[in-house]
Structures are given as structure tokens and as C-alpha cells.
Image (spheres, rainbow, N blue to C red):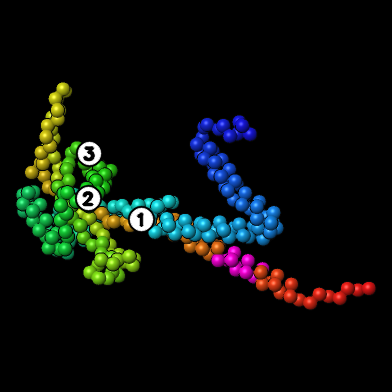
Amino acid sequence: MSALLAVAWEWELRGTLIVIIAVTVLCGSIYLILGTNMGARLGFLVALAGLAGWMFLMGAVWWTYGKGLLGPEASWQPVADKTIIREPDRLGDVGVVDQTITLTGDPTADAHAIEAILQDDGWLKLDSALPGFQQAGSAGTVMMEESGAFAAGEFTVVNVFDKGGERWPSFWDDRIDFLAFFHEPHYALVEVAPLVPQRTEPGRAPARAVVDTERSHEYVFMIRDLGSKRVPAAIITISSLIIFLLLCWLLHTRDRRVVENRSAKALPAKV
């Protein structure tokens, strides 16, 4: 036993042993006490009902505050077959805007014109100091590098546009929205500009990045995945409540049966 408890490798095995011992000591000790006073079957039902009730309360707290066992967080995901847009005039073809974009050949002027078209189409330009700009920009940077369009350090994020994501139903000027379980699709468009290749020299700091004004800006089209952060806690809460109510019904049925049997008249003894 001492050698078994001294396992110092394979953290999965050590963690499994800790969980088994903890559950055995916690639940087993309570069942042992109840079993010696109520009997094996009734003690088991009472102990299991108490465990289910405790799991329900713990799951409700996790579900409310988003703690404990959590699911995937919300994140930006690529739009199928429309994520990396290398030609700005294809923004209308992939559904980013509802109008056709015509380029003039001047990358800087085209970028300003596309920005005006996006804002007219309902896209909101985010300030670079907002957390939403940083989150969407980081996700767009990763997707751009993974696609192979640019390598790290060959481009920079210049603008982030946001559209959709409204929630309903909400009340009192959207200040009460804890019942807003329905969402509109939430999109983000990250605008990146290519950089002028800089020559690096040993022993000197790299030159400051400069946007290449002779190359067109490119875009990353993303959709927001709301994730399932509270789903594990919700499953624990609902499942534990069902088990708790079922066990309470079994205990109530047993009590009624005991009362009925005790109130019945005794059979006369045979001589």
C-alpha cells in the first residue's frame, strides 16, 4: 500500500488514485454511518439522494457564475471558403457587402473607399484601444499566417470592422438582458496591410515597419462562435436535479408503503 500511494510518475494515474480515495472516503464514510442505522438499502438511497442534492447546488453555482467545470470559451472562427480575401473587389462576391466594389488601382485610395463602403453597409469600425479590436486582430493574424498568405512580420493589422451580434429579448433599454438567449450572427472583418521588406543587419535593431503603399490591403472574414462555457455545469445541474427528485420519490413511496404495512391488522396466529 505504501508503494501504491507513493506513485510519483504518470500524473494521470496519481490523479485517478486521489479522486478514487477521496470519493471513497467522503461518500463511503457517510454511507457507512447511514447503513448502520437505517440498513444497507435505505442508507444507500439516503446517501445517494444527499449526494445528488449537493451536486445540484454545486452545479447551480457553477452555472450561475461560470465557474468550475467549463466548456469551450467564445472565439472567432473562419467563415467557410470566405475567410482570406486577398482581392478587395471580392468583398461583394463573398457577401461582406451588398454592392459591387470597383478598384481604381491606387491601393491607398481603394482602402479608404472600401472603408466608407463598409460603414455605409452597417459595419462598425472599432477603435484600436478596444478589447474587441485586439481579440479580433489577434485571431485574424493567426488565420492569415496559417493560410500561408503572409508570414509573421510581413503584415500588420490596420482596421477591424464589426457587424451583428445583437441579443434578444431584452428589456428596459437593453439594461435587463439576462433572458436574451437568442443571438444574431456576429461577424468581424480584419483589414491587414503588407509591409515593406526590411533588411536586417547583425548587431543592429530591426528597422521600423513601413506599410507598402503599392500593394492592396487584404481582409480576414470571421464569425463569432459563442462557445459552450456553461454547458457542462448546466448538464450537471439538470441531471443531478432529476436524480435527486427521483430518489426523493422512491423514498416517499417507501415511507407510504411502510405506513400502510404498519397500519394493517395483524393476522391471527394459528394454533
Whether the magenta-drawn stretch holds residue 236 is answered as: no
Give the residue displayed 23% in from the left and 62% down from the top.
164
Residue 223: image quadrant is bottom left
Residue 237 appears at what percent x and percent y?
A: 47, 60
Residue 248: image quadrant is bottom right
Whether the magenta-drawn stretch holds residue 252 is answered as: yes
Label disc, if present, on residue 131 of the rendered structure = 2
Residue highlighted by disc 1? 227
The answer to whether residue 108 shows anywhere in this view is: yes
Marks 1 and 2, the one that precedes in the sequence: 2
Within 10 angstroms of label 1, few (less than 14), some, or many (20 or more) residues? few
Q: Secondary structure at mark 1?
A: loop
Marks 3 and 1, the one that precedes in the sequence: 3
Q: Quadrant of the C terminus?
A: bottom right
Within 10 angstroms of label 2, few (less than 14), some, or many (20 or more) residues? few
C-alpha span from label 2 to label 3? 24 Å
Q: Looking at the picture, which amino acid does disc 3 mark?
A: Ala
Residue highlighted by disc 3? 151
